[in-house]
Amino acid sequence: MILPATPRLGGRRALVAGSASLAVASLALGRMPGSASAQTAPLPLPATPRQTAGPFYPVDWSGDADADLVRVVGAEAQAIGLVTHLRGRVLDARGRPVDGATVEIWQCDANGLYRHPRDRPGGRDAGFQGRGRAAVGPDGGFAFRTIRPVAYPGRTPHIHVAVAAPGRGEALVTQFYVAGEPLNERDGLFTRLRDPREREAVLLRLQSADRIEPGAVLAVRDIVLG
């Protein structure tokens, strides 16, 4: 006597049921946090660290105070020093351009002197504007033409930066430093930045800018408002 072939039918049903269960489990796994197919929110960008404004924040913004610090209206010659193009964007922590932001920079001239009445006496370079201001574009972009910062007694080469934006409270004030500058590790303000990410956020990596201007250098540094 031959038994009915029901076990074969049952096996097929079990296989189908098992395949369906695996499919459901796979879909569920795909929605689990940390899985390869899970959608995760992008990590926030690290904020540009704050630093002091220093004693020589410009007290006079009248006259020539545009984004080109190398040329002063009425001066016979352009500033002494290595022409440096400083470019970047002002972003929020999500990487979005900050609308309406204004960027200011100020620094000493090639002789180590600020355009400030309290700086030590000396022969200040009349061809160097000393400070500049620019409104960001729709993409958050800004661009300055200045000189490579130089050292003066007690400080490594640096550029002061301030960024103000509507609805964001107190302006961000920080300083930019030249990457690879030996004096950085002896500078009291730079060494206060212990986190490597904070240091990276204020370093300027200079590269040739011959395509922009023969003999000049370029530094690109975004500013992130926390």
Image (cartoon, rainbow, N blue to C red):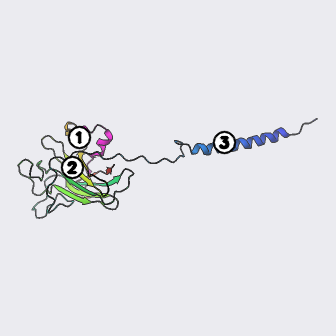
Q: Picture coordinates of residue 122 (x, y %)?
A: 5, 49
User: Hey, which residue is sitting farthest top in the picture?
Assistant: 1
Label 3 SS: helix
Q: CA distance from mark 1 to mark 3?
A: 57 Å
| Residue carrying label 1 | 190
Task: Say which amino acid is labelled 1.
Answer: Phe
In the shown orientation, is residue 192 left or right of residue 43?
left
Q: Picture coordinates of residue 31 (x, y %)?
A: 57, 45
Mark 2 surroundings: few (<14), some (14-19) or many (≥20) residues within 10 A:
many
Q: Point out the tag, 2 or 3, that comes first from the N-terminus.
A: 3
Task: Say which amino acid is labelled 2.
Answer: His
Tags 1 and 3 touching, CB below 8 Å: no
Label 1 SS: helix
Q: Picture coordinates of residue 86 (x, y %)?
A: 25, 54
| Residue carrying label 2 | 160
Q: CA distance from mark 2 to mark 3?
A: 60 Å
User: Hey, which residue is sitting farthest right in the picture?
Assistant: 1
Q: Point out the tag, 2 or 1, that comes first from the N-terminus.
A: 2
Q: Point out the tag, 1 or 3, that comes first from the N-terminus.
A: 3
| Residue carrying label 3 | 22
Q: Which residues are magenta?
A: 189-210
